[in-house]
Image (spheres, rainbow, N blue to C red):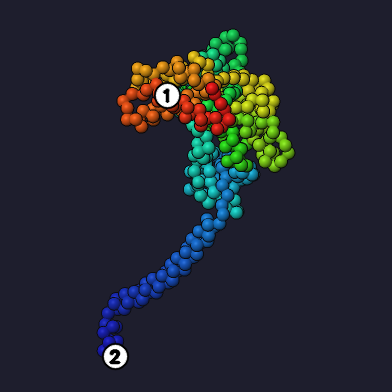
Amino acid sequence: MEESVIRNAGSDTELKYQLKLQDLESQVLDLKVKNDEILRENAQLKRENNQLKRMPLFVAVVVDLLDRGEVYLRQQGNNQEYLTHVNDEIFRQLKPGTKVAVNNALSIVKIVGNIFDSRVRVMELDESPEITFDQVGGLAKEIEEVREAVEYPLTKPEIYERVGVEPPKGILLYGSPGTGKTLIAKAVAHQARATFIRMSGSELVHKYIGEGAQLVRELFSLAREKSPSIVFIDEIDAVGSTRTNDGTSGSAEVQRTLMQLLAEMDGFDTRGDVRIMAATNRVDMLDPALLRPGRFDRVISIPLPTAEGRKEILKIHSARMVLGKDVDLGAIVEMTENATGADLQAICREAGMMAVRREARTLSHDDFVRAVRKVRAEVSTDLRMYT
Ligand SMILES: Nc1ncnc2c1ncn2[C@@H]1O[C@H](COP(=O)(O)OP(=O)(O)OP(=O)(O)O)[C@@H](O)[C@H]1O
Ligand SMILES: [Mg+2]
């Protein structure tokens, strides 16, 4: 004992260092404790944060970015709008149109994506359709009418300006199913080098319940963004038939969608580089509001093909097939009065299948005759009959 005291005291500096070491060790302990506390707190916050993220979140769309990290949001579905604050990290990633998830307290929890992703899911967007007018049989007069109303205002607007004529605002194609309405719309978009944006009226109403009006708004803003463009609303009767006014809540929803469509059309400049087309099988059922001047003010009927048209269509759809010498398309034309373009396409396809089944090198006339019978039997079950 004595010895060790002496030894320890033997060096003053050693003692000093020892004390210092003790001091440091106690500081380390202190920090360890503090660190532990912080880690625990951090874990707790992480848990709470996860909890918040796990709670059902609402989806909203950024309308605008304001100063100092404030964001103007619109909730999808109910269209409620509000302001919220976000941190810099998130703020930097936002722009108008970004989709975000917000929690109960309306703070942005995460970024879901860009709204265009969802729009493109709903709408068929084709930057430049491959269909050309060569692929449309017959309908020369109708095609010319469509070109005048849709294509030339996009490609040669000066002609309209020079003459002082306003091109029609909306073009409505009507005719039986399978007569080539969609085909013409795509071909005109191809010819005008315009983006083709198709939206189905019945999907709008039945599949995206509660979102119809919003989607119509988005359809038109997408069209402006992708211009020159052609908006094609297929089966427009689903949105704008006279029946939609029967006072039920479903019809109120459809009515809102229709109102939005009319509002979008009214706010449109006919000489802009967005053209609006629609198609229907039943023009008689359409709400007259849609047909008023400044809306779908050019109605073009797409009839069943004439004999000459049928021949052209058969040629188009058999162009890549090897036909035997005995094939007489003229005779097939006579057997297919009242057939649509889609029926004739089906006939060519069936005739090809018959030849494949026979393992033949070429299609025979008999393949076509049997194909006509087969397709006619299928068609007559859906109440359309042709000779
Ligand atoms: N005039 C035509 N010339 C060539 N092919 C045609 C013609 N009409 C229709 N077809 C063929 O039938 C298919 C269906 O036509 P399309 O989709 O254009 O019909 P639609 O009139 O839009 O019918 P729906 O009213 O059912 O939408 C086309 O892909 C095409 O192959
Ligand atoms: Mg169609």
Q: Which mark is residue 130?
A: none
Q: CA distance from mark 2 to mark 1?
A: 119 Å
Residue ID at (60%, 40%) = 206
Residue ID at (63%, 27%) = 282
Q: Is residue 263 above or below residue 61?
A: above
Label 1: how many Cα within 10 Å (few below 14, some 14–19, many 20+): many
SS type, badge 1: helix
Q: Quadrant of the C terminus?
A: top right
> Which numbered disc, 2 or 1, marks the residue that appears first in the sequence?
2
Q: Nearer the viewer, residue 84 or 194?
A: 194
Q: Which kind of residue does numbered mark 1 sit on?
A: Phe
Query: Mark 2 sits on what residue?
Result: 1
Give percent across and percent down for residue 263. 65, 29
Query: Mark 1 sits on what residue?
Result: 368
Residue ID at (58%, 30%) = 383
Q: Which kind of residue does numbered mark 2 sit on?
A: Met
Give percent across and percent down for residue 364. 37, 22
Give percent across and percent down for residue 146. 55, 18
Q: Quadrant of the N terminus?
A: bottom left
Q: Nearer the viewer, residue 129 or 69?
A: 129
Camera sees residue 168: yes
Residue 285 lies in quadrant: top right
